[in-house]
Image: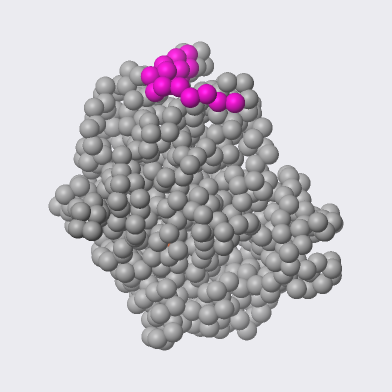
């Protein structure tokens, strides 16, 4: 047994699922994962949720991709790396020559490391010569970032996860942390239960945190900006705001105050369905609290007015002086383990790493000089625009890594019609995803336990992952694959380790100036902005806001109606979200047999009143149809939803909810309005 013990290896890593960023040691023997041991995690201490603890089946799954696959009619055949790279070189070069660099586009992954996101945008910009590069924050968090950048300058959580415990009041809007950010939710549950922290939840659905809340209310879909503006007006009318804070720290107060005029209690009640009493209580609670944290997620962002709602939320925090102290501020709860980092590192069509704009000449000159190239000057296409561009024929080549676009983008049928039109489509992943079915070439990537790198969690915390195993079969780390492709296209990159990539990032990115692997060793971590001397920022705003005069800005927003309203045919409203046991569509979590057994299928929650009206009971299958497509799903009658509200869980690869969602998007960022779908429900014959 001593010998056996000697073969047990303990390696520090970071969870590959959600953006709470739990870190722990993974105990392994050969390729077997023996256990996950959390002990020192800065975000999680000794906690994990079911996913971090058990959902590692994807690493050694039988269907892991181990060799490049080339399309051969309707099937694929295995080829060697050299042949795969030959094909990429030939196709990329040919399309660039015939149609220009903007005929190619790149989608990075929120599951990959920071270093890999940086290299993906460098490949697009420096090697191919296009700014057509994006990542899946476009599907979720860009409106949050927009709302915060407009008002306080940085798109990130205002403080640490631990700081949330210090808030007098936690307000959760359009987020379900008990299932989506479980370890973070535990902190709130504890503070609420034992330390008298107040909890208010605004949501369409009475999820676990709503059940625990002191006040829970259900605004009508897509009206959050209205009640926030209404609450703000009430606070202002009753002089409950913080004039000293505003005088010192916030511009544009008069314009904001004027913009609130239409939001009388009567008007707000009519639009949102929230009673005036509730609005007044909420306003008084916010004004009286010793520190307010607003936690929000997809229920805010995935709407046509997502950016504006995020903006009004931040305005409300400014009005009440709830920035610049621990236990106060905005917490956009990021979804994927590295969705924060994918954007931070510049996999976006308009910015380099650290949100440095591509149309800023000085910035461009800096990158051009360091990289030794000339850089494209105009903003590229985001991943929503890429799909449209494929359909009109101007985009010919797409290279996606670690993103199952077909199930995660909205309006799956529309996306499918685009992907099948591509002249050349490369998908890089660890498993053969639904999107791989549309590919010409599939590249096998290494999983998180098979490489070195860093992830950035929702609290802007940069943490190291360490290589536990060699990549399975012929799979390779994404950064190595990108480097191989870049060099085939004429670059002369010679990164031997991700630490060298991070050194380059730090050199070129003021936001991350002091980041290096020495400072991130083991369980050490840094929260950006990180100054050159290594001083990091657990609290995002301390001495100033990142605007030229150091002040934040009120940014007035107007309420605009939902894009997709119910009709006679599509008379129900479909909402959607994750299930605790699964991550998104479950492409990784379904590969752990125990998890698959306990939660094999997605389901749709139907309110008791609607179920009675339609004569449906739990377990029955229904067809949910929208103007855009349909899915077949099993019913769970539940009082978590009310009236004509439906809620479908995301965990299905074959019947993804996105077959029904539309191509409507947030007006500012093109994030799909996943949460604004009008549908019909037909009961299917019993089987
Ligand atoms: Fe992983 Fe998130 Fe669960 Fe932590 S809370 S173990 S980061 S999925």
- Location of the C terminus by quadrant is bottom right
In the picture, measured across the screen, residue 36 lies left or right of residue 402, that is: left
In the picture, measured across the screen, residue 483 lies left or right of residue 304, that is: left
**Residue 237: x %, y % from top left:** 53, 78
**Residue 343: x %, y % from top left:** 40, 45
Which residues fall within the magenta stretch? 75-94
At x 64%, y 35%, the residue is 416
Residue nearer the viewer, 131 or 646? 646
**Residue 317: x %, y % from top left:** 44, 69
At x 31%, y 64%, the residue is 38
Q: Is residue 340 visible?
A: no
- Location of the N terminus by quadrant is bottom left
Vertical side of 539 occupied by 401: above or below: above
At x 35%, y 19%, the residue is 488
Task: Examine the structure image and report whether residue 333 is included in the region drawn in magenta.
Answer: no
Vertical side of 558 occupied by 47: above or below: below
Residue nearer the viewer, 97 or 493? 493
In the picture, measured across the screen, residue 270 lies left or right of residue 351, that is: right
**Residue 258: x %, y % from top left:** 54, 66
At x 76%, y 51%, the residue is 625
**Residue 374's quadrant in the figure?**
top left
Vertical side of 661 occupied by 493: above or below: above
Q: Can residue 3 be seen in this view?
A: yes
């Amino acid at each position: 047994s001593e010998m056996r013990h000697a073969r047990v290896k303990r390696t520090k890593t970071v969870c590959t699922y959600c953006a709470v960023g739990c870190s722990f040691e993974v105990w392994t023997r050969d390729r077997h994962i023996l256990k996950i041991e959390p002990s020192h995690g800065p975000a999680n201490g000794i906690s994990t949720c079911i996913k971090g603890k058990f959902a590692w089946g994807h690493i050694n799954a039988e269907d892991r991709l181990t060799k490049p696959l080339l399309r051969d009619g309707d099937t694929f055949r295995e080829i060697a790396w050299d042949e795969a790279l030959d094909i990429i070189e030939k196709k990329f070069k040919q399309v660039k020559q015939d149609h220009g660099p903007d005929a190619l586009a790149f989608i990075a992954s929120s599951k990959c490391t920071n270093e890999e996101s940086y290299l993906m945008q460098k490949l697009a910009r420096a090697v191919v010569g296009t700014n057509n590069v994006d990542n899946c924050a476009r599907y979720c968090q860009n409106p949050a970032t927009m709302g915060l950048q407009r008002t306080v300058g940085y798109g990130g959580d205002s403080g640490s996860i631990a700081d949330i415990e210090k808030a007098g009041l936690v307000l959760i809007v359009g987020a379900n942390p008990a299932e989506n950010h479980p370890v973070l939710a535990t902190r709130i549950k504890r503070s609420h239960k034992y330390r008298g922290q107040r909890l208010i939840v605004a949501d369409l659905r009475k999820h676990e945190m709503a059940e625990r809340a002191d006040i829970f209310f259900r605004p009508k879909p897509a009206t959050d900006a209205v009640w926030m503006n209404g609450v703000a007006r009430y606070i202002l009318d009753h002089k409950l705001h913080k004039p000293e804070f505003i005088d010192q720290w916030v511009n544009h107060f008069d314009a904001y105050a004027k913009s609130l005029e239409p939001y009388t209690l009567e008007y707000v009640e009519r639009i949102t369905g929230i009673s005036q009493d509730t609005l007044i209580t909420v306003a008084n609670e916010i004004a009286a609290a010793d520190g307010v944290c607003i936690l929000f997620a997809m229920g805010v962002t995935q709407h046509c007015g997502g950016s504006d709602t995020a903006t009004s939320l931040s305005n409300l925090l400014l009005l009440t002086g709830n920035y610049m102290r621990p236990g106060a501020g905005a917490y956009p709860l990021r979804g994927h383990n590295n969705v924060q980092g994918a954007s931070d590192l510049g996999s976006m069509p308009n910015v380099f790493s650290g949100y440095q704009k591509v149309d800023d000449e000085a910035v461009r000159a800096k990158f051009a000089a360091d990289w030794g190239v000339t850089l494209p000057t105009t903003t590229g296409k985001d991943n929503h625009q890429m799909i449209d561009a494929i359909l009109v024929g101007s985009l010919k080549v797409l290279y996606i890594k670690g993103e199952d676009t077909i199930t995660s983008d909205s309006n799956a049928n529309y996306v499918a019609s685009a992907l099948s039109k591509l002249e050349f489509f490369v998908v890089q992943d660890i498993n053969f995803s639904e999107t791989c079915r549309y590919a010409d070439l599939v590249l096998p990537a290494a999983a998180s336990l098979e490489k070195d790198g860093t992830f950035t969690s929702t609290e802007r915390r940069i943490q190291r992952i360490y290589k536990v195993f060699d990549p399975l079969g012929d799979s390779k780390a994404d950064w190595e694959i990108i480097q191989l492709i870049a060099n085939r296209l004429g670059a002369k990159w010679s990164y031997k380790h991700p630490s060298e990539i991070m050194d380059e990032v730090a050199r070129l990115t003021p936001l991350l100036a002091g980041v290096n692997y020495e400072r991130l060793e083991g369980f050490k971590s840094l929260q950006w902005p990180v100054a050159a001397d290594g001083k990091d920022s657990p609290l995002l705003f301390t001495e100033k806001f990142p605007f030229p005069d150091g002040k934040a800005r009120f940014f007035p927003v107007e309420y605009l109606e939902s894009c997709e309203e119910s009709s006679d045919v599509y008379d129900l409203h479909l909402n959607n979200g994750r299930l605790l046991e699964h991550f998104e569509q479950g492409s990784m979590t379904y590969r752990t047999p125990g998890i698959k057994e306990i939660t094999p299928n997605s389901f749709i929650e139907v309110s008791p009143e609607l179920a009675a009206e339609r004569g449906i009971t739990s377990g029955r299958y229904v067809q949910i149809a929208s103007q855009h497509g349909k899915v077949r799903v099993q019913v769970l009658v539940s009082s978590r939803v009310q009236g004509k509200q439906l809620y479908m869980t995301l965990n299905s690869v074959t019947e993804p909810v996105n077959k029904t969602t539309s191509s409507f998007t947030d007006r500012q960022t093109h994030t799909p309005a996943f949460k604004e779908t009008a549908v019909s429900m037909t009961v299917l014959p019993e089987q």
